[in-house]
Amino acid sequence: IVVGAPFYGQNTNTGPGIVWIYHYNGPTYGWTVLWQSDSSSPPVRTYDSARNGTRVAISDDGLVVAFSSLPPSGTTPYANLRGQVEVLRFADISDLDPTDMYSLNAGDWNIAYPTISDQFGTDLQLSANGNTLIVGANNLLQNGQERGGAFIYTYVTAGASSQYTEVVVRADLGQNFGKTVAISGDGSRIAIGLPNWQNGANFGAIYLYHFDVSTSSFVFNTYIQSSGSENLGASAMSL
């Protein structure tokens, strides 16, 4: 099990937050800490108000873990305002340290506005095998405006090297597009929440996409809308 505590260690709004990974060792020993972010190697974000563990996810076999750190607006240094996601891959459930660790962020998407939080990591989910990850970024900018978006990362191995390839889904809708995200077990379908959908009336909607093999991209399929001001898609969802 993976547990995030983004306000851990904070005294008057300071402290980096923490993530724990627990492993069940049977009725005799119970749950023990397998890994924790404040003693990791390499280290994760350690500055005050980093808020490690804002969102967490784990694969079905427990060998892939993802978590976001999402500092609040106004945090300094400004370069650290932008959200970040760490992905840990373990070779075996008994390992104390991950064999691979990847740091993901919105890259060049917000480079012209480094002091504005893109909210990258406001929500995230892993596919069942942990090889596909979706990350929401509901403040992602386009031409200086908050339009929102979602990033889908796929784990790819090529010889001795491995990396996460990136696909970005943008509907140019704003309205908190990407506030919540979900992915199917096989990684072929995604859902993206827009809790402020309908011209600020806050009805909310969920946009559904499927992966098109021929174009290697996620294609819009349909959407689910609310019939009232219910902020549909504001909290959490699952596929």
Image: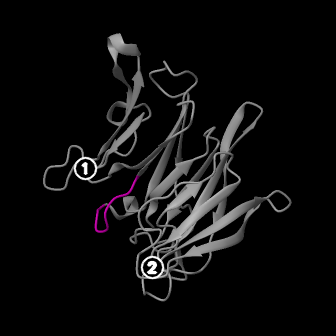
Say few, some or many: other residues with alpha carbon within 10 Å of mark 2 (under 14 / 14 to 19 / 20 or more): many
Say whether residue 74 is magenta: yes
Closer to us: 33 or 167: 33
Disc with the residue nearer the chain's start (1 vs 2): 1
Look at the image and tell me whether residue 228 can be seen.
yes
- Identified by mark 2, the residue type is Asn
Q: Where residue 50 sits: x, y (%)?
A: 32, 52
Residue matched to label 2: 196
Residue matched to label 1: 7
Q: Where residue 188 sits: x, y (%)?
A: 71, 53
Say few, some or many: other residues with alpha carbon within 10 Å of mark 1 (under 14 / 14 to 19 / 20 or more): many
Does residue 186 sit above or below 98 in this rendering? Answer: below
Count of all numbered marks drawn on residues in the image: 2
Q: Residue at x 68, y 38 (%)?
A: 162
Does residue 113 sit above or below 155 in this rendering? Answer: below
Q: Quadrant of the C terminus?
A: bottom right
Residue projecting furthest to the front? 227
Q: Where residue 101 sits: x, y (%)?
A: 53, 37
- Identified by mark 1, the residue type is Phe
Residue projecting furthest to the left? 12
Q: Quadrant of the N terminus?
A: top left
Q: Is residue 230 left or right of residue 17?
A: right
Which image quarter: residue 196?
Answer: bottom left
Residue at mark 1 to residue at mark 2: CA–CA distance = 27 Å
**SS at badge 2:** loop
**SS at badge 1:** loop
Using the image, tell me which numbered label, if any, was put on residue 50.
none
Does residue 239 sit above or below 1 in this rendering? Answer: below
The range drawn in magenta is 69-76
Closer to us: 225 or 87: 225
Which image quarter: residue 114?
Answer: bottom left
